[in-house]
Image: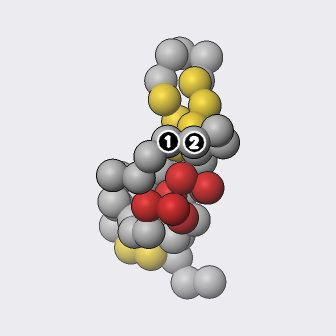
């Protein structure tokens, strides 16, 4: 797991840790969980990657 750095995440109003695009790119792969800031284009509703 990549070390967390400033800008890798923020806390939501509900108290959840939300990973940013910066963190996802550093991690290097899509986990297919439908992350809010996923830079890989995964659509959890269809289970597929969006074409870019």
Q: Residue at x 43, y 61 (%)?
A: 27
- Whether tag 2 and tag 1 are in contact, CB under 8 A, the answer is yes
Q: Residue at x 62, y 83 (%)?
A: 52
Task: Indicate whether 33 appears above or below 52.
Answer: above
Q: How far separated are the C-alphas under marks 2 and 1?
A: 4 Å
10 Å crowding of disc 2: few (<14), some (14-19), many (20+): few
Residue 13 location in percent, x, y?
Answer: 61, 17
Residue 50 location in percent, x, y?
Answer: 52, 76
Q: How is the image coloured?
A: secondary structure
Task: Indicate whether 11 appears above or below 36.
Answer: above
Task: Indicate whether 25 appears above or below 21.
Answer: below
Q: Residue furthest bottom?
A: 51
Q: Is residue 42 left or right of residue 33?
A: right
Marking on residue 5: 2
Q: Residue furthest top?
A: 14
Instruction: Name the secondary structure under disc 1.
Output: loop
10 Å crowding of disc 1: few (<14), some (14-19), many (20+): few
Which quarter of the picture shows residue 9?
A: top right
Viewer can see residue 8: yes
Marking on residue 4: 1
Q: Residue furthest right?
A: 7
Q: Residue at x 64, y 38 (%)?
A: 6
Q: Is residue 1 left or right of residue 35?
A: left
User: As rendered, which of 20 and 5 lies closer to the eye?
Assistant: 5
Which quarter of the picture shows residue 44?
A: bottom left
Residue 40 location in percent, x, y?
Answer: 51, 70
User: As rendered, which of 46 and 14 lies closer to the eye?
Assistant: 14
Instruction: Name the secondary structure under disc 2.
Output: loop
Q: Is residue 2 left or right of residue 19?
A: left
Q: Residue at x 53, y 15 (%)?
A: 14
């Amino acid at each position: 797991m990549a070390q967390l750095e400033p800008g890798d995440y923020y806390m939501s109003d509900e108290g959840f840790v939300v990973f940013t695009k910066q963190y996802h790119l550093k991690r290097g792969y899509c986990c297919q969980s439908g992350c809010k800031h996923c830079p890989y284009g995964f659509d959890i509703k269809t289970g597929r990657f969006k074409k870019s």
